[in-house]
């Protein structure tokens, strides 16, 4: 498993995220395994136990089960767990579009909490790589987090800095 993880971690970007997603997704429990590997590579993101449901170039859908470990004292999902879920969705949407010689990192993140978040949540994010892309281009990506009634509970806007890896 460690050799698989180091290969998975070797070059974030389309050549990697999409390759591993397409390789694991069709297997029984493949989406779960991909989610687990992603959580091992980014441990803090993995702390909420989100499940990756779908990744396509420029699109990600991620779900979060409502359980005690992600709740706050108001009996709803904690604000930072919501931001974390939004960051995962925006990150996968971004990383699924960039090439292996590129990288992305969050510069800023903002959340609008529209209603208490309870029950299973689904975060979706869409991203289109700007053309032409100059090195170190800030790109804003939005994730909508919806509850089981398809009502938006939170909007997360992340600004990702996209650039080329140093040679």
Image: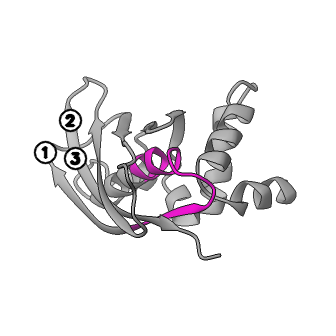
Q: Residue under circle 3?
A: 155
* Secondary structure under the numbered disc 3 in the rendered image: strand
From the viewer's perspective, is residue 163 above or below residue 5? below
From the viewer's perspective, is residue 118 above or below residue 148? below
The alpha-carbon separation of the residues under discs 1 and 2 comes to 7 Å
* Residue furthest left as drawn: 114
Query: Which residue shows up at 76% across the image and 26% down it?
Result: 27
Residues at marks 3 and 1 touching, judged by CB atoms closer than 8 Å:
yes
In this orientation, which residue lies closer to the viewer: 7 or 69? 7
Residues at marks 1 and 2 touching, judged by CB atoms closer than 8 Å:
yes
Query: Which residue shows up at 16% across the image and 53% down it?
Result: 112
Residue range in magenta is 88-106
Mark 2 neighbour density, 10 Å: few (under 14) some (14–19) many (20 or more): some
> Would residue 25 be seen by someone viewing this image from the given angle?
yes
In the picture, measured across the screen, residue 46 lies left or right of residue 27, that is left
* 37 drawn magenta: no
Which dot marks residue 114? 1
Q: Earlier in the sequence, mark 3 or mark 1?
A: 1
From the viewer's perspective, is residue 46 above or below residue 163? above
Mark 3 neighbour density, 10 Å: few (under 14) some (14–19) many (20 or more): many
* Secondary structure under the numbered disc 2 in the rendered image: strand
Which dot marks residue 152? 2
């Amino acid at each position: 498993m460690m050799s698989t993880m180091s290969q998975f971690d070797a070059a974030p970007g389309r050549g990697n995220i999409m390759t591993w997603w397409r390789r694991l997704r069709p297997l029984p429990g493949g989406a779960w395994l991909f989610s687990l590997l992603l959580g091992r590579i980014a441990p803090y993101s993995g702390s909420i136990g989100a499940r990756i449901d779908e990744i396509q170039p420029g699109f990600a859908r991620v779900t979060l089960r409502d359980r005690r470990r992600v709740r706050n004292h108001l009996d709803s999902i904690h604000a930072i767990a919501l931001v974390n879920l939004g960051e995962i969705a925006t990150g996968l949407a971004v990383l699924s579009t960039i090439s292996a010689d590129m990288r992305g990192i969050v510069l800023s993140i903002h959340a609008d909490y529209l209603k208490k978040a309870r029950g299973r949540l689904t975060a979706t994010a869409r991203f289109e790589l700007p053309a032409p892309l100059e090195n170190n281009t800030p790109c804003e990506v939005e994730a909508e987090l919806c509850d089981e009634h398809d009502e938006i509970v939170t909007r997360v806007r992340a600004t990702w800095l996209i650039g080329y890896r140093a040679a």
